[in-house]
Image (cartoon, rainbow, N blue to C red):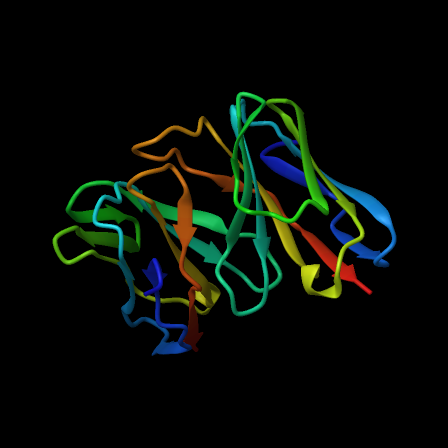
Amino acid sequence: ETGVTQTPRHLVMGMTNKKSLKCEQHLGHNAMYWYKQSAKKPLELMFVYNFKEQTENNSVPSRFSPECPNSSHLFLHLHTLQPEDSALYLCASSLRATSGRTDTQYFGPGTRLTVL
Amino acid sequence: QKEVEQNSGPLSVPEGAIASLNCTYSDRGSQSFFWYRQYSGKSPELIMFIYSNGDKEDGRFTAQLNKASQYVSLLIRDSQPSDSATYLCAVTGGATNKLIFGTGTLLAVQP
């Protein structure tokens, strides 16, 4: 596999369910990101991990819990979500995440999440 | 004021014409500028990035940056129906490495 992969591609869950989204990058990058994309709204950065350390939590509700066991894998654990959390969740990776010029971010195909 | 602004469109151009997509940003300290293309139901894919004032050309695509005016644009020459997509402008915040996206411009190339 090449690039950035995400599983599952589609997920339907109830508000009481617990599920996890998985992202894997095969690019040798050190930074990984979670974004949320809702209709008619810009991509919203949720979390940033740089060399496995979380460097950004963009005021995301605690019902979203990220995990980054190594530089190649990123998870987003979901529990007690709300219908308004339905969106496309995109994972991205870049060489690193540092201040100043930003390395290009490459996106995975996304997980289309529907919360009933 | 939105941090990154784009006209949502749709921008309709005939096949073979030049499509001009525009983006303004609010943080004068921004240093990196990206254009992504997103087909419906797909994830964003990088078209171009630009760091310095002026033009940067790659095939049919030209990115233009004017930091004084806080303006970045993307020109697509010889537009094809396959170019029909939403084009996202993304800018780094000057104080952090956060990539801030606009809402995107929907381009429709008419055959």
Left or right of B66 in this view: A92? right
* Front-lying residue, A10 or A74: A74
B17 versus B97 height, above or below: below
Whether residue A63 is visible here, answered yes or no, is: yes
Which residue sits at x=84%, y=46%?
A18
Residue A31 x, y percent position in the rendering: 51, 29
Residue drawn at (82%, 45%) of the image: A19
User: Quadrant where the N terminus of chain A lies?
Assistant: top right
Query: Residue A116: x, y in percent?
Result: 82, 65
| Position above or below: B66 against A107 | below
Let me know if residue B76 appears in the view. Answer: no
**What is the tally of numbered marks visible in this picture?**
0
- Residue that protrudes farthest toward the left in the picture: B68
Who is closer to the viewer here, A86 or B58? A86
Q: Quadrant of residue A2?
A: top right
On screen, residue B105 above or below A53: below
Which residue is located at x 37 percent, y 74 percent?
A: B15
- Residue B5 to residue B44: above or below: below
Residue A47 in the image, given as x and y percentages of width and height = 56, 39
Q: Position of residue A17 (x, y in %)?
A: 87, 51
Residue A14 relative to residue B63: left or right:
right
